[in-house]
Amino acid sequence: MPHCHEEHCDHDHNDAPGAGDQWNLYSRIDHTNVRCLNEAEPNSGRRVIKPWHERMDPTSWLESDADEQLIIHVPFTGTVRLRCICLRTDPGESAPATLKTFINRDDIDFDTAESYVPTQTWELVQENHGVLEYTTRVAKFTNVRTLALYFPDNFGGDTSIIRFLGFKGEWSEMKRDPIITVYEANANPADHKNPAGENKLDYSIQ
């Protein structure tokens, strides 16, 4: 059964089949372009983003490589109003202790993560069982296209281990800004001699 941390969580705690799907954003993630920095096994960061019904699957996990730090970049297929980040970690010292998130930044690495101000920071709970849900300050997460998750430390282990990563919120199709083309309908040299500049202009919005 998932637990709530930080602020009030607006979700169903029922753990019956299909529970957790109301706000589940799994199908709204661009899984092919998920990337992880300092993962011990290539693409293991991608594999811990699982469907809700596979959250307790023991066969795949993410472990850091050179040290305890991890960064995961998660792009969405549209814009997201992010409500919760769901985590299941390894019990013991390998559980991440802190999470910092950055929205709509593709340049986050281990240097920039320490110099930029995060959108939100959580002190994580060392949990032995189940999934923990960390609620966001929703007003700061209303137009999320990409999310960078930075785990800078753990509870004392040489490496960090994450077994499930999920997201809850609302998705909407990404809106593209209109392209405004301004052009001169009838270019005439005589027009350009008019000091009043009364050229006719047409506007095309695509």
Image (cartoon, grey):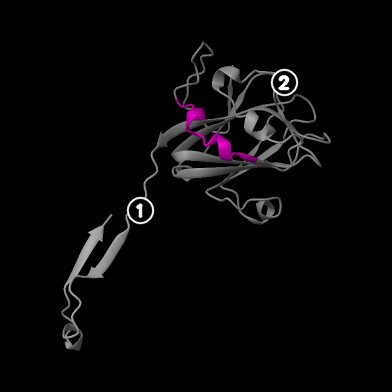
Q: Which residues are magenta?
A: 23-35
Mark 1 near mark 2, Cβ–Cβ under 8 Å? no
Q: Is residue 9 above or below residue 32?
A: above
Q: Is residue 18 left or right of residue 64?
A: left
Q: Is residue 79 above or below residue 9?
A: below
Q: Quadrant of the N terminus?
A: top right
Image point (49%, 26%), residue name = 24
Q: Amino acid at mark 1?
A: Asp
Decide: few, some or many residues near mark 2? Use Cα within 10 Å; few <14, some 14-19, many ≥20: few
Q: Position of residue 146 (x, y in %)?
A: 53, 44
Q: Is residue 180 left or right of residue 54?
A: left
Residue under label 1: 177
Residue under label 2: 128
Q: Nearer the viewer, residue 133 or 70?
A: 70
Q: Nearer the viewer, residue 45 or 7?
A: 45
Magenta span includes 198:
no
Q: Is residue 56 above or below residue 10?
A: above
Element under disc 1: loop
Q: Position of residue 151 (x, y in %)?
A: 69, 40
